[in-house]
Image (spheres, rainbow, N blue to C red):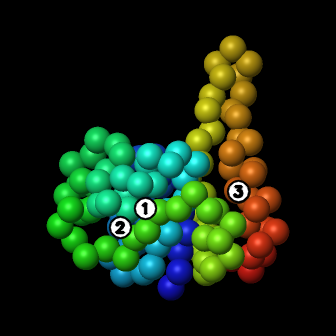
Amino acid sequence: MNIAVAGTGYVGLSIATLLSQHHHVTAVDIVPEKVEQINHKKSPIQDDYIERYLAEKDLDLTATLDGEAAYRDADFVVIAAPTNYDSRKNFFDTSAVEAVIQLVMKVNPEA
């Protein structure tokens, strides 16, 4: 199965790491340094399990900046993009999630 994971923070990278033990996973991020680290089997976040899995396990995991290509080829897309909370406005900024949804619907509405 081809799975794309949008976002490589704690949630996204944890999900991508676990799923990539049994499926092809493409992790999508907008930060080039994070993509490069993941592709070199280094965790861009401090997490003992993720660090160990990337270093020691045979994972089918790649990272990319090209969300369009990743989503086009995906059977499933997991969205783990940030939803920053503004306590003064009592508002969650869901624009990153909405942008991923729009792109997925454009390139692969069956995902």
Q: On the image, numbered disc 1 is attached to which residue?
A: 15
Residue at 38% x, 62% y is 39
**Alpha-carbon neighbours of circle 3 within 10 Å: few (<14), some, or many (≥20)?**
many
Going from N to C along the chain, the mark reached first, 3 or 1, is 1
Q: What's the mark number on residue 100?
A: 3
Residue at 47% x, 73% y is 25
Q: Nearer the viewer, residue 88 or 35?
A: 35
Q: What's the mark number on residue 18?
A: 2
Residue 42: image x %, image y %?
29, 54
**Alpha-carbon neighbours of circle 2 within 10 Å: few (<14), some, or many (≥20)?**
some
The Cα–Cα distance between marks 2 and 1, rounded to whole angstroms, is 5 Å
Occupied quadrant, residue 40: bottom left
Going from N to C along the chain, the mark reached first, 3 or 2, is 2
The residue tagged with tag 1: helix, strand or loop?
A: helix
For the residues labelled 2 and 1, say whether their Cβ atoms are less than 8 Å apart. yes
Relative placement, left or right, of 85 versus 11 is: right
Q: Amino acid at mark 2?
A: Leu
Look at discs 3 and 2 and give the one toward the viewer: 3
User: Does 53 sit above or below residue 60?
Assistant: above
